Amino acid sequence: MKWPNLFFVFATLGVAACTTYQGTPANPIERSLTWFSYLAGDDIRLACRSGRPDHYRFVYNGIYELQIRGYELTPVPGGADLTVRARGRSGLINRFTIDNPFGPWKLLQSQAHLDNPTAASIIEAYAAAIATSPPSAGQLLDSNEYYWIVAGCSAGKFTLNAFLDPKVNINALEFPRLLLAHDESGVPFRKAEFVEGFDDAVFTIQINRTGDNLSGRL
C-alpha cells in the first residue's frame, strides 16, 4: 500500500513551480515545493561565477514515482565530496512511524570523499556523454520516463544537460556507474527499462533553447 505522492498534492495547488531551492530540504514537503528549482540548479546558477568552486548536481529520474536519486559533487582540498540522496517507490506506508512521519517519502543519504583522480574521472565521463548525446536544449522530460539531468558550474559557466532514454542508452553511460561506485544510500539502482501501460500523474519539464535553464514546468 502507498499514499498519494506529496509532489502531486502541492503541484495541483500550483505552488511547486514558484519556490526556489536554496539548499538541502528539511523534509519531503519542502522538497516537493522546490523540486523544479532543484532540477534546474537554480542555487548553482546563482553562485556560478568566475573564481567560484565548480559544482555538479546529477539527478536520476527512474520514473519519479518509483525512484529518484541525486548526487552532489563539490570540490574540497585534495579532492571532492559526494553527497548521495535516493529513494525507491514513494509513499510506502510501511516506512511510516510516529517518530518519522515523513518516512514514506524520505530520501536516504550517504557521503563519500573522492580523491582528485576519482572526481576528475566522473567529470570526464560526463563530458564524454555530452559529446556523444543529442543536444539537450529544448528537450522535454516526463516524470514517467527514465533520464539523467545534470546542472553544473565549471570555470564560472553554468550548464544544464539531459540524457533521456531511449534517445540515449542511459544504461550504458559511464558517469552513472562511477557515481554508483560511491553510493552507500542502500537504495538499489533502478535501470531504465520499457514499462508498458504505466499509469502515473505525469509532470513535464523542458530545457530552454540555450541549455541553461528550464523553460517549461507543466
Image: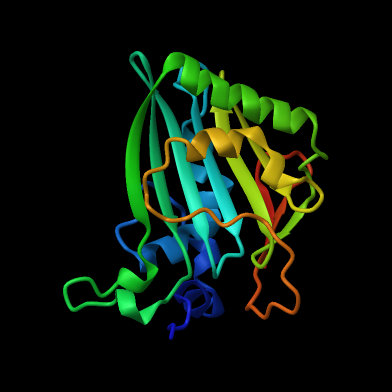
Name, please, the residue furthest toward the bottom. 1
Q: Nearer the viewer, residue 143 or 40?
A: 143
Residue 101's place in the image compared with 58, above or below, is: below
Quarter occupied by the C terminus: bottom right
Residue 215 is left or right of residue 44, and the answer is right
Identified at 60% across, 34% down, the residue is 175
Tell me residue 95's x, y (percent). Answer: 31, 74
Q: Could you say where residue 211 lies in the image, as x and y percent from the top left?
A: 72, 40
Foreground residue among 185 and 32? 185
Residue occupying the point 70% across, 40% down: 172
Question: The N terminus appears in which quarter of the rendering?
Answer: bottom left
Q: Is residue 84 above or below residue 62?
A: above
Count all numbered tags in the image, as a single digit.
0
- For this view, does 160 lie left or right of residue 111? right
Position of 194 with respect to 48 (left or right) is: right
Q: Residue at x 78, y 43 (%)?
A: 137
Q: Is residue 158 visible?
A: yes
Farthest residue to the left: give it: 99
Camera-nearest residue between 44 and 105: 105
